[in-house]
Amino acid sequence: MAVRAVRGAIQLDHDDRDHLLAGVTELVKQVLEQNGFAVEDLISMLFTATPDLHSEFPAVAARELGIVDVPLMCAQEIDVTGAMPRVVRLLAHVETLRGRHEIQHVYLGGAAALRRDIAQ
């Protein structure tokens, strides 16, 4: 087993609690599904949100998915002029047999433009 990191992001249409939770839920599900990870494979998850998102903590979506015994943390993304608005990013650490090159990073919606080099 190795410890690997997987990234993901989603751009939301607007700042609304239900919309944020639905988007982050989809992001977490896609990261797990596209990589064949189970919740038991997760070590930790870090979420960041751009400063224009403040309706809810993104980690709430993971908790509502049943990810209850994995350390989660939320932080605010650096407020850089001209940066893409309304983005939640995810960095998950997992235990896996997959090689680094086999990890599928997930960028949904407009966030796909953030990392065209690794977005699936």
Image (spheres, rainbow, N blue to C red):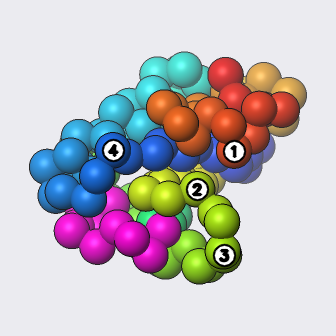
Please give the name of the residue rendered at 74% of the width and 40% of the height, measured from the top-left corner: 115
Crowd rating for badge 4 (residues with CA inside 10 Å; few <14, some 14–19, many 20+): some
Please give the name of the residue rendered at 54% of the width and 20% of the height, measured from the top-left corner: 34
Q: Amino acid at mark 4?
A: Asp
> Is residue 58 depicted above or below 4 in this figure?
below
Query: Disc 4, disc 2: CB below 8 Å?
Result: no
Crowd rating for badge 2 (residues with CA inside 10 Å; few <14, some 14–19, many 20+): some
Crowd rating for badge 1 (residues with CA inside 10 Å; few <14, some 14–19, many 20+): some
Main SS of the magenta segment?
loop
Please give the name of the residue rendered at 28% of the width and 73% of the height, measured from the top-left corner: 54
CA gap between label 1 and label 4 equals: 16 Å
Q: Which residue is mark 2?
A: 84
Q: Amino acid at mark 3?
A: Val
Circle 1 SS class? helix
CA gap between label 4 and label 2 equals: 12 Å
Asked whether 114 or 33 is in front, the reply is 114
**Which contiguous range is marked in magenta?**
50-61
Q: Which residue is mark 1?
A: 114
